[in-house]
Image (cartoon, coloured by chain):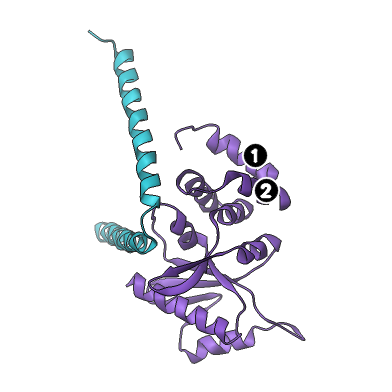
Chain colours: A cyan, B purple
Amino acid sequence: MSSRKDTYRQIREFNEKTFREKAKRRRRNAKLPFEEKLKIVEELNILIEDFAKNRENKKA
Amino acid sequence: MLNEDIKKALRLANDMEKRGIIGKYAIGGAIGTIYWTEAYSTKDLDLFLRLPLSSGGLSLMPFMSYLAEKGYPFSAQYLKIGTLMVDFVGVYNPLTDEALDNAVEVTVYDVPTRVFRPEYLAAIALQTGRIQDFEKVIRLYRESDLDVKYLEKIIKEHNLSRRWNEFKKRYISADKRI
């Protein structure tokens, strides 16, 4: 039976792998055509506005 | 729509440049950074430009009159085009001046324009030094194919070595995963 320390180590190794994958994905996404990236910017702006509206609605 | 707003802003800047109201201009800031990195949220389009000099110094009047004539709401140095905040930033020091000289010619939605090279965007962000500027340097360093030797040459020429070394120590050496 693995100890808690072993479990943490395995999870950390898995996380490290995920970080490396994410870094690769970011570099791939950076190479998308600029116009495509601007579409993503617009979608992100809308999403952030929605989050802000939701927060306001919850407060009210 | 952001694409329509950007097109309008770039056509406006091109028209002003053609008429001699402004000198050369290029995209910098967050949207300039996004040209080279993964997309992130922003509503600011920073256009760095040279203003023509008159006998009395900087000639701002034709620039302001042109924008007023076009009917754009203009407050402080921001111009609102749809949801986009367009910031006309006069080149304000030798680094931004040099960045403009070395800007890359690009086409965005079929509109010809220029964008700062990633090395200059990183150096300007490093010089400006707010938290969001350091985030830009990290993005440019890890996601764009910037030429580190070229960046270090700019850093040395503009006396940013101390800041760059602190940055590297804090963010690059400390985290190999970026």
Q: Nearer the viewer, residue B70 or B38?
A: B38
Element at label 2: helix
User: Can residue B74 be seen from the camera position used here?
Assistant: no
The amino acid beneath tag 1 is Asn
Relative to B64, say whether B149 is above or below: above
Element at label 1: helix
Q: Residue at x 34, y 18 (%)?
A: A9
Same chain for labels 2 and 1? Say yes or no: yes
What label sits on residue B165 in the rendered view?
1
Left or right placement of residue A35 versus residue A1 in this view: right
The amino acid beneath tag 2 is Lys
Residue A51 horizontal/vertical position (percent): 29, 57
- State which quadrant residue B98 falls in: bottom right
Crowd rating for badge 1 (residues with CA inside 10 Å; few <14, some 14–19, many 20+): few
Chain of the residue where label 1 is placed in the rendered structure: B
How many numbered marks does the figure carry?
Answer: 2
Q: Nearer the viewer, residue B57 or A8?
A: B57
Q: Nearer the viewer, residue B138 or B17?
A: B17
The residue mark sitting in front, 2 or 1, is: 2
Q: Residue at x 61, y 85 (%)?
A: B20
Residue B103 horizontal/vertical position (percent): 57, 64
What label sits on residue B45 in the rendered view?
none
Dot 2 or dot 1: first in sequence order is: 2
What's the CA distance linking mark 2 and mark 1?
13 Å
Relative to B34, say whether A21 is above or below: above
Residue A43 horizontal/vertical position (percent): 30, 61
Q: Residue at x 56, y 47 (%)?
A: B147
Looking at the image, the residue that sits furthest to the right is B55
Relative to B130, say whether B107 is above or below: below
Looking at the image, the residue that sits furthest to the top is A1
Chain of the residue where label 2 is placed in the rendered structure: B
In the picture of the structure, the residue carrying the numbered disc 2 is: B153
